[in-house]
């Protein structure tokens, strides 16, 4: 058995949860916040049999896509910084970050 921690962008969470339900993948959904952009993420905690790990990873990959987004960097008080540094910059967000961890025990009470 494996434990998957899948961190995805909020925009993909409903579609992924629906796909998990359709494919009989049990997952716990947590609202989380990313550190870099301080924007909303969703973390799914999934306990799954070893033979289904690739199937679940494939589901996540098919639903969670990266996209371009603009962000304004924080204002710097350093005079040496270029004045153009306060203009919005394009960054890539989304997709999924998935950790696969071994499970030593599983208990359901």
Image: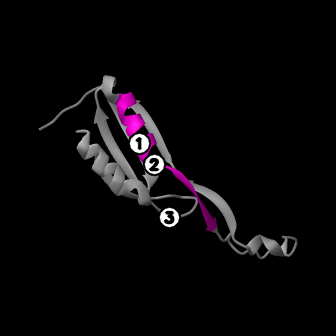
Q: Position of residue 107 (x, y in %)?
A: 18, 33
Cα gap from disc 1 to disc 2, whole angstroms: 6 Å
Q: Which residue is mark 3?
A: 39
* Residue in front for this viewpoint, 61 or 89: 61
Cα gap from disc 3 to disc 1, whole angstroms: 20 Å
Q: Position of residue 86 (x, y in %)?
A: 74, 74
**Label 3 secondary element:** loop
Q: Which residue is mark 2?
A: 64
Dot 1 and dot 2 residues touching (CB under 8 Å) = yes
Q: Which residues are magenta?
A: 53-70
Who comes first in sequence, dot 3 or dot 2? 3
Cα gap from disc 3 to disc 2, whole angstroms: 16 Å
Q: Which mark is residue 60?
A: 1
Does the magenta segment cover residue 40?
no
Placement of 94 over or under 107, stated as above or below: below
Dot 3 and dot 1 residues touching (CB under 8 Å) = no
Placement of 88 over or under 51, stated as above or below: below
Observer able to see residue 102: no
Task: Choose top left, top right, bottom left or bottom right for residue 27.
Answer: top left
Task: Choose top left, top right, bottom left or bottom right for residue 82.
Answer: bottom right
Q: Position of residue 98 (x, y in %)?
A: 45, 40
Does the magenta segment cover residue 63?
yes
Q: What is the crowding at mark 3: few (fewer than 14 residues within 10 Å), some, or many (at least 20)?
A: few
């Amino acid at each position: 058995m494996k434990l998957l921690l899948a961190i995805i962008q909020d925009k993909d969470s409903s579609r992924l949860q629906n796909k998990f339900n359709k494919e009989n993948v049990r997952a716990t959904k947590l609202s989380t916040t990313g550190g870099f952009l301080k924007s909303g993420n969703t973390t799914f905690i999934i306990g799954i049999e070893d033979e289904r790990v690739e199937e679940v990873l494939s589901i996540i990959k098919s639903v969670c896509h990266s996209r371009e987004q603009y962000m304004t960097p924080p204002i710097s008080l350093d005079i040496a910084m270029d004045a153009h540094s306060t203009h919005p910059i394009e960054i890539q967000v989304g997709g999924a970050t998935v950790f696969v961890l071994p499970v030593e025990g599983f208990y359901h009470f």
